[in-house]
């Protein structure tokens, strides 16, 4: 899927001895599209400043900062919650990166390393970084927890202690010890 703010860069065309700076700032229409795509009410502003640095060898390193203001509903009250996002972004594109082809693969220690693409769309990097930085369960200030206990009439609600797997065994053991006496 093409990113909302497409900014393709061919790394081979960039200077090989110095860093290249790129700033991405979506316009109002792109902010609306980003909000729809990422499932939030609104982005008030988004800005990403990136540095693409060559080396070592044929590898490239992308470092930058992501700043955004997002509005989304509180998961308890559905009131709008405004969150400021200030995050760092780091990716390393390795020319000799081998994509594992096996069914079961161990996760690499450094998950910021990716295969070196012929064409890198910085809009994809922006959307991925935003998606990872948006709070999953925003809460309005003062929102209280919802009590979701449900029990049949006349029954005692389950407590945390009652659902522990060995709580029943401790009671059984105590009963057996009393019966022995």
Image (spheres, rainbow, N blue to C red):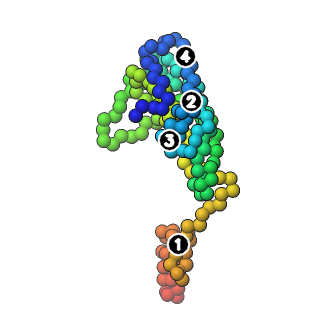
Q: Which residue is mark 1?
A: 150
Say if mark 1 contacts mark 4, CB within 8 Å: no
Say if mark 1 contacts mark 3, CB within 8 Å: no
Find residue 21 and report its image quarter.
top right
Of the numbered discs 2 and 4, the one sitting upstream in the chain is 4
Per the rendering, the mark at residue 36 is 3
Residue at the image position 64 percent from the left and 40 percent from the top: 84
* Callout in the foreground (2, 4): 2
* Callout in the foreground (4, 3): 3
Of the numbered discs 1 and 3, the one sitting upstream in the chain is 3
Mark 2 residue crowding within 10 angstroms, few (<14) / some (14–19) / many (20+): few
Residue at the image position 51 percent from the left and 83 percent from the top: 175
Indicate the secondary structure of the residue bearing disc 3: helix
For the question of whether residue 88 can be seen, the reply is no
Residue at the image position 56 percent from the left and 30 percent from the top: 27
Indicate the secondary structure of the residue bearing disc 2: loop
* Callout in the foreground (1, 3): 3
Per the rendering, the mark at residue 27 is 2
The picture places residue 25, in percent across and down from the top left corner, at 57, 28
Residue at the image position 52 percent from the left and 85 percent from the top: 178
Mark 4 residue crowding within 10 angstroms, few (<14) / some (14–19) / many (20+): some
Of the numbered discs 4 and 3, the one sitting upstream in the chain is 4
Q: Which residue is mark 4?
A: 19
The picture places residue 120, in percent across and down from the top left corner, at 44, 24
């Amino acid at each position: 899927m093409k990113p909302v703010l497409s900014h393709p860069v061919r790394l081979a065309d960039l200077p090989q001895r110095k860093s290249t700076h790129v700033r991405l700032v979506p316009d109002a229409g792109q902010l609306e599209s980003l909000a729809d795509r990422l499932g939030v009410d609104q982005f008030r502003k988004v800005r990403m400043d990136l540095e693409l640095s060559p080396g070592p060898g044929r590898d490239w390193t992308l470092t930058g900062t992501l700043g955004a203001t997002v509005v989304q509903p509180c998961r308890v009250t559905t009131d709008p919650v405004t969150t400021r996002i200030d995050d760092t972004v780091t990716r390393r594109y390795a020319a000799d990166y081998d994509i594992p082809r096996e069914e079961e693969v161990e996760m690499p220690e450094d998950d910021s390393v990716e295969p070196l693409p012929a064409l890198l769309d910085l809009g994809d990097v922006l959307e991925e970084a935003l998606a990872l930085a948006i709070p999953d369960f925003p809460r309005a200030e003062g929102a209280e927890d919802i009590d979701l206990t449900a029990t049949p009439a006349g029954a005692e609600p389950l407590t945390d202690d009652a659902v522990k797997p060995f709580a029943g065994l401790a009671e059984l053991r105590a009963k057996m010890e009393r019966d022995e006496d």
